Image (cartoon, helix red, strand yellow):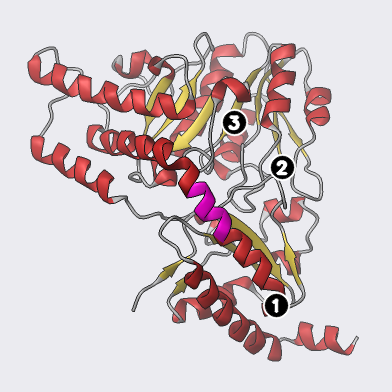
Amino acid sequence: MKVINLDHISAKPLLPEVKTVMIEAIEKDYHNPASQHKSGEEAAAVLQNARKAVAQLLNCKTPKEIVFTSGGTESVNHAIKGVALANEDRGKHIVTSNIEHNAVIRSLRRLKSAGFVVTSLPVDSSGRVKPRDVADAITKDTILVSIMHSNNETGTIQPIEEIGAITREKKVIFHTDAVDSVGVLPMDVQKLGVDLLSFAANTFYGPAGVGGLYIRRGTRIFPLLDGGVQENNKRAGAENLVGIIGMGKAAELALRDMDKRLAHLRTLKNRLLTELPKTIDEYIVNTHPEHSLPNLLSISVQYIEGESVMLMLDDENIAVSTRSACATGSLRASHVLLSLGLSHADAQGTLVLSFGIDNTENDIDTFLKALKAVVTTLRDISPLYQKASKA
C-alpha cells in the first residue's frame, strides 16, 4: 500500500533526474578533482559546474563563495566556529535566538566553554525575532549574529533582510541557517544581506549527506577541517563528487521549477488550512500565517499526545512527525514551541506536517479523514479532554 509522506522535512525523495546523473557519475568513476592530470581536471570541471549551479540558485557574485560540506550540520558548525576562531581578537560575543536548530545551539555551547559569551533572543508569540532586539543586543564585542532563515519545526520565516541591514550598519558578521529554505523559496544572498548561509541538498530533492556554506568574499573565517587545500582552502578533504553532482542537478531543477513548485505547495497548504477546522476542533496553529514556508505546517492538537497520533497515523500508512528529525527521541517538550508560549501539554500534542511536490490534494484529504478518526479515538480515552469537556 502506498505511504503518504507528510514528513518531507525529514526525508524527501531523490528526483529521477538527480538519480540519473549520480548513477552516471558512479559508472564514469571520476578521478579525484585535486589531481593534476587529465582525469583529475575532468573531475574538477564537473565539480565546478555543480558549484556554478548552486551559486546561481543563491545568486552569489562568484561560485568561489560556495564551499561544499557533508550537509547542513557541518555547514552550521563551520560558519559559527570558523567565524568565532577567526575573529576572537575583535571580541567574543555572539547573538542568536531561542529557536535555533541544535546544530547552532550545540556549536554555541561548545564556544561558551571556550570563553565566548552568547546572547539568545526571545521570539514573539508568532515565532519571529524582533530586529530591534538584535540591534539592542549587539555590543562593541559582538563578532557574529546567527539567526535561522526558517524554523525547522514551525516553518516560520525570520525577518532576515531587516536583520541583515542592522548587521551591515554595525559591521558584524551575519550567518543564517537556511537549510529548510534553500531550494524551497527563492533565495538571494545579496538581497538578504547575509555573510554566511548554510544549506543542504536533501531539502531540494538532492542526496542526503551533502550540503554547503555560502561565504561572502572577504568574510574572516577559519576552516573547520584542516588538511589539504580543497574548496579554495576553506575545507580540507576530498569532495563527495557523486553527491555534489547530484546536488548541482537538484539546484538546477529547483531554480528552473521554482514557480511551479511554489504554486503546488501553496495549494496543498491552503487546502489543509481550509479543511482542518471542518475536521477537528481545539487545536493551535504554530506556523505564522504569512511569513512561513509553503510546505510546512505545525499544529498542536489539545488534550492528546502528538506521538500517539503519529503512531496511529503510521498504522494507516501516513507519515507525519511530532518535531524535526534532529530532535526525535527527546522526551522533553520542544524548546521552539515553549519559546512561542505554549504549555508543555500543548507542545506535546504537536504534529509537524511537511509536504512535497510528489503529494496531491487527495493525500491531504486522506490525511484529514484519518486524523479525525485518530483524534476522536484518543480524546475518548483522554482524562484531560474529559475534564475540559466537563468544565
Q: Indicate the position of residue 90 as horizontal and vertical percent values.
A: 66, 9
Tag on residue 176? 3
The quadrant in which residue 246 appears is top left
Q: Earlier in the sequence, mark 1 or mark 2?
A: 2
**Residue that appears at 84% across and 87% down:** 389
Quadrant (top left/top right/bottom left/bottom right) for the C terminus: bottom right
Q: In the displayed structure, does residue 333 sit left or right of residue 31?
A: right
Mark 1, residue position: 278
Label 1 Cα crowd, 10 Å radius (few <14 / some 14-19 / many 20+): few
The reply to whether the C-beta atoms of the residues labelled 3 and 2 are less than 8 Å apart is: no
Q: Nearer the viewer, mark 1 or mark 2?
A: 1
Decide whether the magenta segment is chiefly helix, strand or loop: helix
Q: In the displayed structure, does residue 108 sit left or right of residue 246?
A: right
Kind of residue sitting beneath label 1: Lys
Tag on residue 57? none
Q: What secondary structure is found at the residue carrying circle 1?
A: helix
- Which span is picked out in magenta? 261-267
Q: Earlier in the sequence, mark 3 or mark 2?
A: 2
How far apart, in angstroms, are the residues tagged by discs 3 and 1?
Answer: 37 Å
Kind of residue sitting beneath label 3: Thr
Q: Nearer the viewer, mark 3 or mark 1?
A: 1
